[in-house]
Image (cartoon, rainbow, N blue to C red):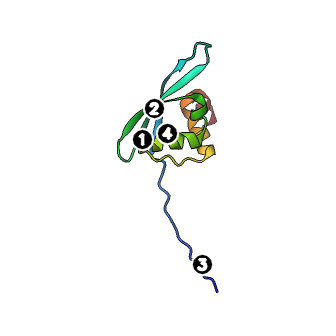
Amino acid sequence: MTTCRQIEVAVPEPNLTFKHLGHTQREDGLIGRYHLEVTDTRSGKTATISVEPRHLASARSMKSILLDRCMFYRASRAEHDQMLLEILDPQSFALQD
């Protein structure tokens, strides 16, 4: 006979905030890198990161990049997409509210 236990875990609110500082362009005019300031609101630790668009677009890549800086990013793909919309197109985000 197998018994199952139900465990409740309180999931904390997201603790990272992102600020778009700007971007650099490649010679062909496309965006080469985005520059972001990431702040851990719990510890107060701030990191400035510079990432290629393909890495910024990937929640998995961002998790790895931030983990290298001792910051735990646990956003789902949908939450990550929402964060990108908020920092890269604030006007569009304001229209959704």
Is 54 located above or below residue 73 in the figure?
A: above
Q: Which x, y percent locates residue 95?
A: 62, 32
Q: Residue at x 58, y 21 (%)?
A: 31
Q: Residue at x 58, y 32 (%)?
A: 94
- Tell me which numbered mark, 1 or 2, is placed earlier along the sequence: 2
**Which numbered disc covers residue 4?**
3
- Say what amino acid the circle numbered 3 marks: Cys
Q: Which x, y percent locates residue 21?
A: 46, 25
Is 7 located above or below residue 91 in the figure?
A: below
- Say what amino acid the circle numbered 2 marks: Ile
How crowded pointer 3 is (Cα within 10 Å; few <14, some 14-19, many 20+) is rated as few
Spatial CA span between label 2 and label 4:
9 Å
Whether residues under marks 1 and 2 lie with C-beta atoms below 8 angstroms apart, the answer is yes
Disc 1 marks which residue? 69
Disc 4 marks which residue? 65
**Which numbered disc covers residue 1?**
none
Label 2: element kind? strand
Q: Residue at x 57, y 34 (%)?
A: 55
Q: Quadrant of the C terminus?
A: top right
Front disc: 3 or 2: 2
- Say what amino acid the circle numbered 4 marks: Ile
